[in-house]
Amino acid sequence: METHASIDKAKAYFDVQLTRPESARRVALGPFITISRESGSGGSALAEELSRRLDRFLTVEQPHWTVFDRNLVEKMLEHYQLAASLSRFLPEDKVSEIDSSVGEILGLHPSIWTLVHQTNSTMRRLAGMGNVILVGRGANFATAGLGHGLHVRLIGSPERRARRIGTLRGLPAELALAHNRKADAARRDYVRSFFDADIDDPATYDLMVNMDRFTIEQAADLVIALLQSRGELVLPA
């Protein structure tokens, strides 16, 4: 669950960075990270852990590392001056064809393809400026081809992921397993529908981490070490 502090931090990054002159955006201020995850593998927790740790590599001029997760669609709608209520049409899966088509026919909202395109465009702009962690929504596909990106996918056994979700949401084992199956299927459908890609394709990631074998802290160690090995993280003098 996102805290008020993380939401405020994202708002500050979004408001300041996306209002910078275009000429100031031509060079990324730092690397960016995308996190794709199987449900219950700890994607949001890893993003927050990385955000805290990566700030120690910043220079005075650079913005704090910021996580864009559930708050991404909210900020995209705000940036494009669209109604916040449209967020219900943009879950991380393919929306109901009936809800979508009726709304478009009546002119109640832009097409779903337009909203997804604007979300992808927002992710690319944020990634281009650097020092952001984008969680889910096919971020690795939306930002494909941009330099300075590290694309991570978290996986794990159904049983362990169900235990994690069960603990977080207070669900018994069977309901936690069902929740994860539904969420994973929805995310695969979202990526297939809007990127014509396979979310499970290992060739689309730089690093895949089996979270049965690593803690969140150890996974963060791996990501930071990889960024350092590529020369994209240097401690300030």
Image (cartoon, grey):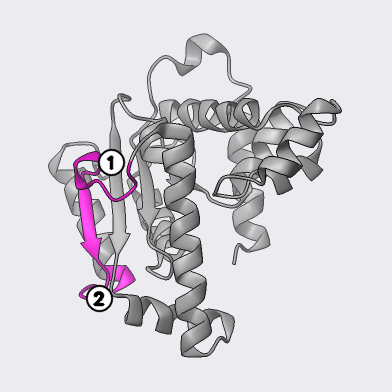
Q: Label 1 belongs to which residue?
A: 150
| Span highlighted in magenta in the image | 198-217
Q: Secondary structure at mark 2?
A: loop
> What residue occupies the far top of the structure in this picture?
23
Across and down, in percent, residue 164 comes to 43, 80
Instruction: Name the residue at 23% across, 72% down.
Output: 214
Quadrant of the image occupied by residue 211? bottom left
Amino acid marked by disc 1: Leu
Quadrant of res 127: top left
Classify the position of the N terminus by image quarter.
Answer: bottom right
**Are the residues tagged 1 and 2 within 8 Å (C-beta)?**
no
Which quadrant of the rendered structure holds the C terminus?
top left
Residue 82 sits inside the magenta stretch = no
At label 2, the amino acid type is Asp
Residue marked by disc 2: 212
Q: Which residue is rendered at x = 69% and y = 27% of the image?
A: 111
In the image, is 174 to the left or to the right of 3?
left
Left/right of residue 60 with respect to residue 77 in the rendered view: left
How many angstroms separate mark 1 from mark 2 (CA)? Answer: 21 Å
